[in-house]
Image (spheres, coloured by chain):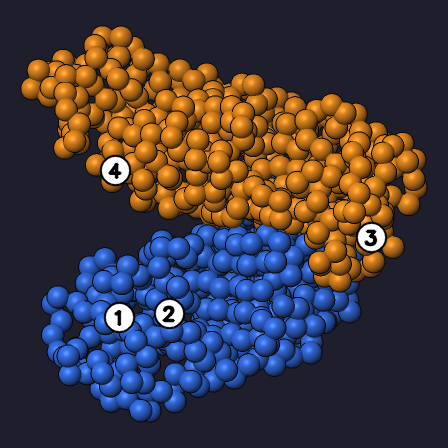
Chain colours: A orange, B blue
Amino acid sequence: MIKVAVLGYGTVGSGVLEVFQKNQEILNQNVGEEIELKYVLDRKKFPGDPVERYLIHDFETIVNDPEIKIVVEVMGGLNPSFDFVKRCLENQKSVCTSNKELVAQHGTDLLLTAKEHHVNFLFEASCGGGIPIIRPLYQSLTADRIDEVSGILNGTTNYILSKMTSDGYGFEEVLKRAQDKGYAERDPQADVEGYDACRKIAILSSLAFGNYIDYKDIYTEGITDITATDIKYAKAAGAVIKLLAIGRRTDQGAYALVCPVMIDASNSLYSVNSVFNAVSVHGNMIGDAMFYGKGAGKRPTASAVVADVVEAAKNPGTTVMGDGWNAKKLELMPLDDIPGRFFVRIQGNIAACLPSVESVFGEVDPITVPSIDREFGFFTGEMTEAQYKEKTERLEGIIHMIRVRF
Amino acid sequence: MIKVAVLGYGTVGSGVLEVFQKNQEILNQNVGEEIELKYVLDRKKFPGDPVERYLIHDFETIVNDPEIKIVVEVMGGLNPSFDFVKRCLENQKSVCTSNKELVAQHGTDLLLTAKEHHVNFLFEASCGGGIPIIRPLYQSLTADRIDEVSGILNGTTNYILSKMTSDGYGFEEVLKRAQDKGYAERDPQADVEGYDACRKIAILSSLAFGNYIDYKDIYTEGITDITATDIKYAKAAGAVIKLLAIGRRTDQGAYALVCPVMIDASNSLYSVNSVFNAVSVHGNMIGDAMFYGKGAGKRPTASAVVADVVEAAKNPGTTVMGDGWNAKKLELMPLDDIPGRFFVRIQGNIAACLPSVESVFGEVDPITVPSIDREFGFFTGEMTEAQYKEKTERLEGIIHMIRVRF
């Protein structure tokens, strides 16, 4: 009999309880022995709730109970999560978490602690709730050198951009609707500014490339500047705008960034819409593989964290993820050195402005949208961010730039 | 030091050698110790080929060499593969295979043999070469009750249907082009008749539902009857036709089938085109998750089979897949009892024929295609296959029926 404790009875915590109640038999089968919820820790009381028989208010009960072999951390935040998780690992309890801040900030430390104490620190649910991606990275794509991990890692922004594309509304209006529907937080900054996706791509890239990547080193730009007009240009070019998180290593070095990107139908992420998330992985042998699912939500996230519980339960005494990643930090290339193409909108009419654009960028095909006057757009060729910046210093009338991947 | 032998130096076998040569260091890192290719078995000689230093012609050398801990079977077919694989397992050697016939026909026996001898029988590469799906099924989706596994599991037929859709050609013409490009075999029967997809869905459903499913019980219909006209109707209805393989369990029982199906854009498989394959899994907690990649090809298949080698190497003495599936056969519902909707094409003009159609199927919305005269199509409501058959016995002029999922 393996006993489990859950830290936190919020949305995900209640989903974990639901998984245990609905799928108890399946869990026992998959573990190969009985596995049972013993405690749920929360400061609040929940009179009449099914959690009552498990509810406790003192963390010490959990950390001092030798019966507890696995602890699920779904409180979020860093304090007291970090302290609680660290103490659990030091007390020979495996920890499974959905907390991306915790993993991005303290993952290296916690992976080492887990290894030292021969237990597991697992975090499938931290990067795209219901998309199995962490385990495939360390257990399925093991014959490849992974060159790139990229993805749509935030459901709120993907919902907003999908709605802007399908309905033609502006950012503010769609955000308001998303908040009304509960798809966006009242304080949406972590999502719309890309901070959430940034932490997730830091975790995924660290695993894929084998060295710790500091999320604070990753250039991050959100979607608040994307307008209905930008979306119209994307449509005219046969493309869509997505908030992509990209981690890539090349012969010149590794880089990572989070920003809105125009992609076309040849990209497998093109048709990932609404609250769905997807992660695309490129390996030198497998080529492109993609993993797709609901990136958030109570049940998908709970499913992922309980699958980690099953993995920990099946592997007592073994650290299944090995080192996870090396504690030696991977230095990322500066933004200036990252190569790419750019879509640029220019104020003014084509006849008057195209010569100066072409004197800077060479020959381009101007793009116009019937309903939009006195401006046009164009795609640059491949160049570094620094080269792009240098060129734009010599050009007037730039309204907006969006990065391009095709 | 772990030593590996490969049975068969065909396309996949040469890919396995390439993975070992290109990614040797990554393999050592992921296993946690050195892993080395020792033998490649083939009847032929390959003068001047990099395989020469590994090449042997006698299987007994492998099975009797105690240094060999893992054997890769990539010969295909059942004879002598089955005998070789069984003897390897009985001699405490783990086996990793890409051979779907072998797994569909003898998987239950070989899983049991592996478990008895505390070794692994792994077959990630047997179902959609480069799509990590087998391992996610038994290691990531372990907190869910899986209700359905469905997918596009054959690259040749998906290429043909995608080309028919994009270019408007008929089946025979596209098949010929696919053969010229090497995307289809000279004898394409196993692909175009659905036999290949049938074996793969038998394996995936057995794993997902936990009991052995006999591929011979699965209703299988290929794409040879799909015409350019069918594709035009699908387009008119905002749909595409895909060869789907479906395994599903409901309160009424489990069923599986392989057949051309019309799906619309709400289905995550809708935009899986060309030689790409995808598997969609529905669990009671995670909802829909999808796995996407190249279903075949030398490198993706080799990547998958070598990832199994890494898994076997990391877990000596443990059967990571457990039972895999139970030897007790899962009885499938007869085709007659399977529910669904149907798209039906009727000979004749609407005014004359619609009344008799509606007298049998109730009110329907007829669909016409501008360039096609003297016929029309319609979608039925939900009914069982038997009910559909019974109704069509009362109706004349049916040209073609295609199953529908939306």
3 and 1 marks on the same chain: no
Quadrant hosting residue A269: top left
Label 1 is found on which chain of the structure?
Answer: B
Q: Is residue B219 left or right of residue B72?
A: left
Q: Position of residue B234 (x, y in %)?
A: 27, 65
Measure the alpha-carbon separation of dots 3 and 1: 53 Å
Q: Position of residue A110 (x, y in %)?
A: 74, 29
Q: How many neighbours does mark 1 have within 10 angstroms: few (below 14), some (14-19), or many (20 or more)?
A: few
What's the residue at 17%, 24% (across, down)? A376
Q: Secondary structure at mark 3?
A: strand
Other-residue count near label 2 (Cα within 10 Å), few / some / many at <14 / 14–19 / ≥20 = many
In the image, which is nearer the foreground, mark 1 or mark 2? 1
Task: Write down the chain letter for disc 2.
Answer: B
- Res B365 label: 1
Q: Residue at x 27, y 8 (%)?
A: A393
Tell me the distance, in whole angstroms, between the alpha carbons under discs 3 and 4. 52 Å
Q: Which residue is mark 2?
A: B404
Q: Is residue B399 depicted above or below A6 in this figure?
A: below
The residue wearing badge 3 is A36
Q: CA distance from mark 2 to mark 4?
A: 30 Å
Q: Badge 3: how crowded within 10 Å, few (<14), some, or many (20+)?
A: some
Q: Position of residue A41 (x, y in %)?
A: 81, 37
First in residue order: circle 1 vs circle 2: 1
Q: CA distance from mark 1 to mark 2?
A: 15 Å
User: B30 or B293: which is nearer to us?
Assistant: B293
Three-letter amino acid code at disc 1? Asp
Q: CA distance from mark 2 to mark 3?
A: 42 Å
